[in-house]
Image (spheres, rainbow, N blue to C red):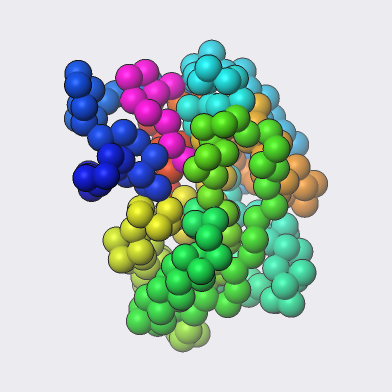
Amino acid sequence: MTQDPSGGYGWADALPAKQGLYDPSNERDACGVGFIINIKGHPSHSLLRDSENLLCNMSHRGATGADERDGDGAGVMTSMPHAFMVKAFQALDCNLPPAGQYAVGNVFLHPDADTRLQSQYIFDHIAGDLGLHTVAWRLVPTNSGILGPSGSSKEPVVMQPLVVAAAEHLDEGAFQRRLFILRKRAQREIGFKKWFYVCSLATRNIVYKGQLTPEQVPEYYADLRDPDYETHFALVHSRFSTNTFPSWERAQPFNWCAHN
């Protein structure tokens, strides 16, 4: 845990420092987790909509602030919606390779344009060091108007890097390992102070989350309402901070899992 002597710690300094009777080492949380899957592996948009109902039915397992628009955190992990991503990146004049040969993930970035561009530059440079190539960055459409004062005060810009292997001979296992190293190195070298956080970066799954209530997840992320967004599974999570503080990066699911 990185402590900021000026008073905050963690991602975007969103959490208070140790003071009085409060000690962040004592923090615990209790949450709601749900999972839905098509056992034959057939993707559909209707499964995603069913997962939204599942998530909203776990609102009692989450919590809100004094302003009910401020959630403790909620999100969803799905399989990579290939058809949707093809359409989304075609708008940027990018033609996606076949499914499994590229990675896309949601990344939290600083609202300040210069800080954001610097973070993207470092990310791209690390990718190059690993034999990977960031083809494009897509700005994820979001609905900021539904957020409460706490969530909006630390709202990041959400962008999606499209990452491919620079060498065609790179096998899937090696590609996945380099994506893991890219995510870890970028997080360490760019850091929470610049509001940088990688929600996920993989070829098979993607995570949409934030300091939201369950009901706000599909409202905030327009991608999730697109009929071309199809998935064969969905892992949803509603966070109850208990005696912890909410922040955007603490929302779940994480890169590969979610927990109670």
**Residue drawn at x 21%, y 31% as measured from the top left:** 18
Q: Nearer the viewer, residue 38 or 145?
A: 145
Residue 16 lies in the magenta stretch: no
Q: Position of residue 150 (x, y in %)?
A: 52, 32
User: Above or below — where is 77 with respect to 121?
Assistant: above
The quarter of the image holding the N terminus is top left
**Residue 253, can we see it?**
no
Q: Residue furthest right?
A: 227
* Magenta region, residue range: 240-248
**Residue drawn at x 27%, y 44% as measured from the top left:** 6
Instruction: Say how many tags the image has.
Output: 0
**Side of 136 relative to 169 (left or right):** right
**Side of 122 relative to 45 (left or right):** left
**Side of 142 relative to 4 (left or right):** right
Q: Position of residue 11 (x, y in %)?
A: 37, 46
Q: Main secondary structure of the magenta part?
A: loop
**Residue 92, can we see it?**
yes
Q: Position of residue 227 (x, y in %)?
A: 80, 46
Q: Nearer the viewer, residue 42 or 11?
A: 11
The quarter of the image holding the C terminus is top left
**Residue drawn at x 52%, y 75% as measured from the top left:** 134
**Side of 194 relative to 104 (left or right):** left
Q: Nearer the viewer, residue 5 or 69?
A: 5
Q: Residue furthest top?
A: 60
User: Above or below — where is 157 with respect to 172?
Assistant: above
User: Above or below — where is 18 with respect to 160?
Assistant: above
User: Above or below — where is 244 with respect to 146?
Assistant: above
Q: Residue furthest front?
A: 6
**Residue drawn at x 55%, y 65% as measured from the top left:** 113
